[in-house]
Image: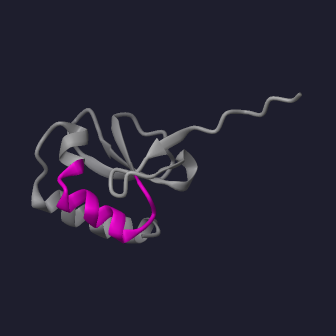
């Protein structure tokens, strides 16, 4: 019996579906408080994962799930930046 390498799983904050970490897009709050899309998955800071679908991002924003995940309120400008970055990342 062979044991394969464990694939990390994460839950989408938008649709609440558990998927492989590599299939998802990571939103990061850096230690300085900056929000960005982490394409490498290696930026330091608190992360939240979203499926690569715009509807998942919109569900996360509408349900204030990003704010709950990061335990802080987010400015509207941050949401606009995330929508723009998300489009570039493949949403």
Specify the quadrant of the image occupied by residue 85: bottom left
Q: Residue furthest right?
A: 1
Q: Position of residue 14 (x, y in %)?
A: 33, 57
Specify the quadrant of the image occupied by residue 2: top right
Q: Position of residue 4 (x, y in %)?
A: 78, 34
Q: Position of residue 16 (x, y in %)?
A: 38, 51
Q: Nearer the viewer, residue 40 or 74?
A: 74
Report the label total: 0
Q: Quadrant of the N terminus?
A: top right
Left/right of residue 48 with respect to residue 24 in the rendered view: left
Q: Main secondary structure of the magenta part?
A: helix
State whether residue 38 is above or below residue 29: below
Residue at (14%, 61%) from the top-left corner? 77
Residue at (55%, 55%) from the top-left corner? 23
Residue extent of the magenta highlight = 50-65
State whether residue 90 is above or below residue 28: below
Magenta run includes residue 33: no
- The image's colour scheme reads one colour
Q: Nearer the viewer, residue 11 or 88?
A: 11
Q: Position of residue 40 (x, y in %)?
A: 51, 48
State whether residue 45 is above or below residue 82: above
Left/right of residue 81 with respect to residue 21 in the rendered view: left
Residue at (20%, 42%) from the top-left corner? 68
Residue at (26%, 57%) from the top-left corner? 60
Q: Quadrant of the C terminus?
A: bottom left
């Amino acid at each position: 019996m062979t044991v394969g390498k464990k694939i990390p799983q994460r839950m989408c904050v938008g649709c609440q579906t558990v998927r492989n970490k590599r299939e998802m897009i990571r939103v990061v709050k850096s230690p300085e408080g900056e929000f960005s899309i982490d394409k490498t998955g290696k930026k330091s800071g608190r992360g939240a994962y979203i499926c690569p679908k715009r509807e998942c991002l919109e569900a996360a924003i509408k349900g204030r799930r990003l704010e709950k995940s990061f335990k802080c309120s987010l400015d509207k400008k941050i949401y606009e930046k995330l929508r723009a970055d998300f489009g570039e990342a493949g949403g």
